[in-house]
Image (cartoon, grey):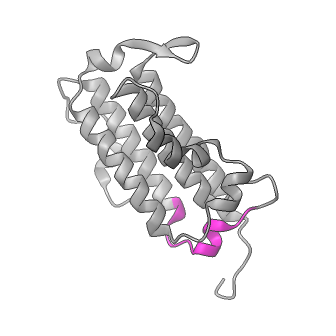
């Protein structure tokens, strides 16, 4: 960890502790995700453990896609538009199309996309208050608070980071290993 403040979620106290805490959790999750993939090669990012597995690169792009879709849902309060559908559908759904199309990118490609999406999340959440975050809105066939929706973005990243760590431990040895 390069930022010792990642462990100080909710400190210092703010007028909007829910927003502040959520931002802290998102930052911590992202930091540990990036740490898990540090220095991976294109070959390692593209490796699939078996025919049903996703690559590490696809999982990273999936994290960005999920976050971008929740931005539209919560910040813009709308369905994804045509451009978002074209950009995010494959990494959001993963599966065979992602297995074929999300390949041959260096780590910086995924880092840049994750950073681009996260920059908007940070900006938009910093403009909101706890009342906004706590407000319920339609979600699928239910209602959910925006807080739950952003918790789910964090939860999804942590889940896929676990998969990534599992995959990293099983990467084939290279000549340098």
Q: Quadrant of the N terminus?
A: bottom left
> In this rendering, is residue 141 above or below 82?
above
For the point 20% across and 35% down, the residue is 12
Q: Quadrant of residue 147?
A: top left
Q: Position of residue 69 (x, y in %)?
A: 46, 36
**Quadrant of the drawing holding the C terminus:** bottom right
**Image-based side of 169 in relation to 78, left or right:** right
Q: Residue furthest bottom?
A: 175
> Residue 92: which quarter of the image?
top right
- Please state which of residues 131 and 84 is positioned toward the viewer in this rendering: 84
Question: Which of 97/152 is in front?
Answer: 97
Q: Is residue 11 visible?
A: yes
Left or right position of 97 against 150:
right
Q: Is residue 54 visible?
A: no
Estimate the x, y position of residue 143 in percent, counting from the top left.
Answer: 50, 11
Q: Position of residue 54 (x, y in %)?
A: 70, 54
Most extreme residue toward the right is 51
Instruction: Tell me: 64 left or right of 123.
Output: right
Q: Residue placed at 64% from the left, 42% from the top? A: 93
Q: Is residue 44 above or below residue 56?
A: below
Residue 79, relative to residue 8: is it above or below?
Answer: above
Residue 167 coordinates in the image, percent (x, y): 69, 59
Residue ID at (73%, 65%): 170
Q: In the rendered structure, which segment of residues is drawn in magenta?
A: 36-48
39 part of magenta stretch: yes
User: Which residue is found at the position 77% from the left and 61% from the top?
Assistant: 49
């Amino acid at each position: 960890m390069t930022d010792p403040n990642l462990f100080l979620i909710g400190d210092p106290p703010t007028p909007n502790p829910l927003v502040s805490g959520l931002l802290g959790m998102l930052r911590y999750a992202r930091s540990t995700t990036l740490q898990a993939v540090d220095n991976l090669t294109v070959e390692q990012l593209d490796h699939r453990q078996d025919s049903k597995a996703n690559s590490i690169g696809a999982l990273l792009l999936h994290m960005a896609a999920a976050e971008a879709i929740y931005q539209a849902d919560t910040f813009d309060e709308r369905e994804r538009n045509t451009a978002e559908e074209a950009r995010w559908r494959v990494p959001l759904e993963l599966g065979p199309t992602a297995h074929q199309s999300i390949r041959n990118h260096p780590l910086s490609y995924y880092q840049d996309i994750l950073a681009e999406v996260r920059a908007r999340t940070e900006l938009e959440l910093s403009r909101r208050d706890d009342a906004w975050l706590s407000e319920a809105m339609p979600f699928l066939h239910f209602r959910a608070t925006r807080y739950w929706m952003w918790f789910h973005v964090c939860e999804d990243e942590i889940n896929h980071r676990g998969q990534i760590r599992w995959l990293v431990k099983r990467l084939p040895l290279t000549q340098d290993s």
